[in-house]
Image (tube, helix red, strand yellow):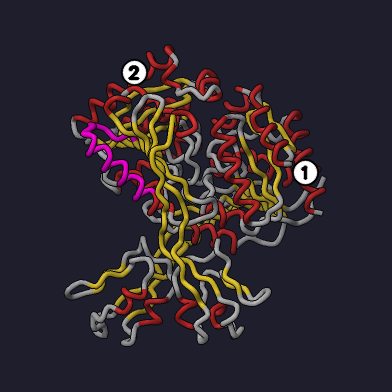
């Protein structure tokens, strides 16, 4: 099984549109997993029906039993996350509680209660291509994105192996923090989607720096090219200097947006498909060769 | 028009809707009238600097550190109480030593509290930087997480700690979980920047959920406004939210923003930005 991830650093560069298109290109031989657990969007375009639902429980949260509490304030003093306030009797704000348990250590009255933290949901679904997809949603405001990404990827990987399918297509979250790292760790190939803009280029460089630290093979795909040709040239020069192979360039075009607005995967347009197919073939080839530069 | 001193957070849920370009242009617009600070809280991928390339003063850089427990091997008995106490699996006891995993550690101090041999103490480890500089009249505070580190929330907190009490514009990270919550946590008003697409709408609804959980006043701006605005407007009408501003899509603006150029001085947009101030003033006053 080859794991091919699409990431960008910058949000809005087109990773979901492109990873969905890539999955459409190889739908009979891949499973799709949406690892943007903060804001999972891919299902909006391709989900035909849910097959299974799993609760995501990670770590614990703490609360104070008002009847036992003696209002000594030791918990509030001890909490380094400022999650405990004395207003209306001591109370732990769930959104700020990191689940460390330090309050439990110092409470003299046994008033601190520990409960498992249900913070998200995982889904397996069938797509409009009759392929399988997995996605997860963290409850808005919650923590533990990295763990949820790890868990949803594991489920998707196991599914792909069991179904004896050769590819897992991974749509990654933005940023370069914990959830992004969990989505790209140990992939066979990372497709860096570079939005052709100052911010997009800057952010892609940080992502590539991270990927190199993590020893992950990368190729690049420039998106929204043509608005600022000088930036396109700078990107090409950077890729060349750093020996990063480009699999292609997609020009900025409003058709992309209008297809999304019709809830269509971009690859379903004939013009876009003829532009993208050679790019996707190149990605598949490189992944098969072991992602070597 | 001026605003009273308050904190305005620009957030979105979805990445790429234009919160950074809008936050920077709005801050530059306000800086022509009053003292204002601009903070880059998208510390994993800070982009404010892409727009502020001219008129910059020298940058001051301060290291951001976290407290990481270190083991004194001469005192450690490998009893394992530190690892048992840690809810984050940041400590692992092997045959002859205790390993500490920086990526898992939240510096809660529980391991130190539970050690009976005084074998643990904190040591400072770098996780990122806060860069500060002036750009003409605008004071900028930029947080930047070290690549490979995961302590996003801590770097955001360190940026916020350094900001003076004055009108503050915060550029927030995308997403709807911990980093975004930390970024908007102290805001007096949250400007939710969306785009008229199915993804934009879906992520806006998640961002609204967070703002409501935190009891924040918020308003919605449609950026890249076009014929599809009705998608957002229907959602707002059904839920009693107001779209208080629309910024039309234009290839010229896409080009400018893509190139890191500012548009706040353009007469069409300065009127839009002034209207934003009028709306916010009514809410925060």
Name the residue rendered at 29%, 35% in the picture: A168
Please state the horizontal and vertical placement of residue B143, each as a whole percent of the image: 52, 54
- Residue A35: tell me if it is visible: no
Going by the image, does A43 lie left or right of B193?
left
Q: Is residue B248 above or below residue B174?
A: above
Name the residue rendered at 59%, 41% in the picture: B20
Please state the horizontal and vertical placement of residue A54, each as a whole percent of the image: 40, 49
State the predominant SS element of the stretch in magenta.
helix
Please state the horizontal and vertical placement of residue B44, each as a whole percent of the image: 46, 49
Q: Which residues are magenta?
A: A149-169
Q: Quadrant of the N terminus of chain A?
A: top left
Say which quarter of the image contains residue B32.
top right
Say which quarter of the image contains residue A147.
bottom left
Discs 2, 1 touching: Cβ within 8 Å: no
Query: On the image, numbered disc 1 is attached to which residue?
Result: B277
Nearer to us in this view, B37 or B240: B240
Q: Is residue A290 above or below residue B79?
A: above
Question: How many tags in the picture?
Answer: 2
Q: Is residue A164 located in the magenta-colored stretch of the structure?
A: yes
Measured in 3D between alpha carbons, the distance from the residue under mark 2 to the one under mark 1, in whole angstroms, is 47 Å
Query: On the image, numbered disc 2 is attached to which residue?
Result: A277
The numbered mark 1 sits on a residue in which chain? Answer: B
- Residue B179: tell me if it is visible: yes
Q: Is residue B114 above or below residue B140?
A: below
The numbered mark 2 sits on a residue in which chain? Answer: A
Name the residue rendered at 44%, 42% in the picture: A36
Between tags 2 and 1, which lies in front? 2
Secondary element at image label 1:
helix
Secondary element at image label 2:
helix
């Amino acid at each position: 099984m080859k794991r091919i991830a699409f990431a960008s650093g910058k949000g809005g560069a087109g990773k979901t549109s492109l990873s969905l298109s890539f999955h459409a290109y190889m739908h009979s031989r891949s499973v799709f997993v949406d690892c943007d657990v903060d804001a999972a969007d891919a299902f909006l375009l391709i989900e035909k029906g849910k097959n299974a639902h799993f609760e995501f429980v990670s770590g614990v949260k703490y609360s104070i039993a008002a009847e036992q509490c003696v209002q000594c304030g030791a918990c509030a003093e001890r909490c380094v996350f400022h999650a405990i306030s004395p207003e209306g009797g001591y109370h732990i704000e769930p959104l700020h509680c990191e689940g460390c348990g330090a309050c439990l250590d110092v409470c003299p009255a046994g008033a601190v209660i520990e409960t498992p933290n249900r913070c998200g949901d995982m889904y397996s679904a069938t797509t409009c291509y009759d392929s399988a997809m997995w996605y997860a949603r963290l409850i808005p405001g919650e923590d533990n994105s990295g763990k949820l990404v790890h868990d949803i990827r594991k489920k998707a990987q196991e599914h792909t192996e069991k179904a004896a399918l050769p590819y897992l297509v991974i749509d990654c979250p933005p940023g370069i923090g914990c959830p992004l790292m969990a989505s790209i760790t140990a992939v066979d190939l990372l497709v860096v989607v570079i939005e052709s803009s100052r911010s997009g280029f800057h952010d892609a460089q940080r992502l590539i720096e991270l990927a190199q630290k993590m020893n992950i093979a990368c190729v690049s795909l420039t998106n929204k090219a043509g608005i600022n040709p000088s930036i396109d040239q700078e990107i090409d020069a950077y890729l060349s200097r750093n020996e990063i192979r480009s699999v292609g360039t997609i020009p900025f075009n409003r058709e992309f947006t209008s297809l999304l607005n019709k809830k269509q995967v971009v690859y379903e347009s004939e013009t876009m498909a003829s532009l993208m197919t050679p790019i996707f073939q190149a990605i598949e080839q490189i992944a098969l060769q072991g992602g070597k530069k | 028009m001026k605003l009273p001193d308050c904190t305005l957070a620009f957030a979105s849920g979805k990445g790429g809707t234009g919160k950074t370009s809008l936050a920077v242009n709005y801050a530059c617009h306000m800086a022509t009238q009053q003292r204002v600070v601009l903070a880059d809280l998208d510390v994993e991928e800070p982009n404010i600097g892409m727009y502020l390339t001219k008129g910059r003063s020298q940058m001051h850089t301060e290291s951001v550190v976290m407290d990481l427990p270190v083991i004194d091997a001469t005192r450690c008995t490998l009893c394992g109480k530190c690892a048992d106490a840690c809810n984050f699996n940041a400590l692992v006891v092997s045959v002859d030593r205790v390993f500490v995993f920086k990526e898992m550690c939240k510096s809660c101090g529980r391991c130190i509290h539970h050690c009976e041999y005084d074998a643990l103490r904190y040591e400072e480890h770098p996780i990122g930087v806060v860069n500060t500089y002036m750009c003409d009249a605008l004071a900028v505070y930029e947080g930047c997480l070290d690549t490979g580190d995961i302590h996003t929330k801590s770097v955001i907190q360190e940026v916020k700690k350094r900001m003076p009490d004055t009108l503050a514009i915060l550029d927030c990270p995308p997403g709807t979980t911990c980093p975004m919550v930390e970024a908007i946590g102290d805001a007096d008003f949250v400007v939710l920047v969306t785009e008229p697409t199915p993804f934009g709408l879906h992520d806006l609804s998640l961002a609204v959920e967070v703002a409501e959980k935190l009891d924040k006043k918020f308003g919605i701006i449609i950026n890249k406004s076009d014929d599809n605005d009705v998608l957002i407007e229907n959602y707002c009408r059904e839920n009693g939210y107001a779209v208080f501003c629309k910024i039309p899509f234009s290839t010229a603006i896409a080009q400018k923003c893509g190139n890191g150029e500012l548009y706040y001085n353009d007469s069409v947009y300065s009127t839009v930005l002034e209207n934003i101030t009028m709306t916010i003033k009514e809410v925060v006053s």
